[in-house]
Image (cartoon, rainbow, N blue to C red):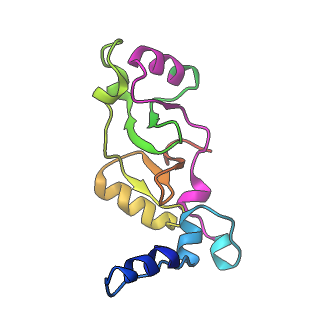
Amino acid sequence: MSRRAAARLESFGLENICVYVAGKQDWLAFDLPFEGSLAETRTAGTSAIKDMPVCGPLDKIAEVRRRAEQADWQECVVVNETRVVLGLLEKEALGANDELPVEEVMDPAPLTLRPYFPWKSVMEKMHARKTAVALVTRPDGKLVGLLKPSKTR
């Protein structure tokens, strides 16, 4: 929380107020540019595909399927109007009834990773979850990209 908010809470008699101070990890989590040894490391953010199909939760399956197929994809990331991730549609869900809204068949809890995750950790997490797709998001939930090791960037 900000210093201003902390001061206001203290004025109400609250104690042990924590003031948020952004650091290196926060910088990396927001997918901001970086230098040094980490710049040479393959990470979730540097490996993410940025131009994957996205759709809204109320879009109809038929339209989303058509757009995904035109882009040669079998997935579609479900986002809101500010690109906050709400879910993921994979191949099986894209085969649902044409008139269903996306929100009824999407996976509401896909694997999400921060941009700074090293590639080895990415692969371990994907293996542990038994998934071929992971989403890269910032701390505010906004989509950075999609990881699909079987698809090249």
* Relative vertical location of residue 138 with respect to residue 103 in this rendering, above or below: below
Q: Nearer the viewer, residue 86 or 18?
A: 18
**Residue 50 at x, y percent in the picture:** 61, 44
Q: Which residues are magenta?
A: 41-68
Determine the residue positioned at 35% across, 21% down.
101
Q: Nearer the viewer, residue 106 or 56?
A: 56
Placement of the C terminus among the 4 image quadrants: top right
Residue 89 is left or right of residue 114, and the answer is left
**Residue 65 at x, y percent in the picture:** 45, 20
Residue 74 is left or right of residue 96, and the answer is right
**Residue 136 at x, y percent in the picture:** 49, 53
**Residue 71 at x, y percent in the picture:** 58, 25
In the rendered picture of this protein, how many numbered marks are placed on residues? 0
Instruction: Report if residue 15 lies within the magenta region.
Output: no
Determine the residue positioned at 46% across, 81% down.
7
Q: What residue occupies the far bottom of the structure in this picture?
A: 16
Instruction: Report if residue 63 lies within the magenta region.
Output: yes
* Relative vertical location of residue 2 with respect to residue 90 in this rendering, above or below: below
* Relative vertical location of residue 96 with respect to residue 49 in this rendering, above or below: above
Q: Nearer the viewer, residue 19 or 100?
A: 19
Residue 131 is left or right of residue 52, and the answer is left
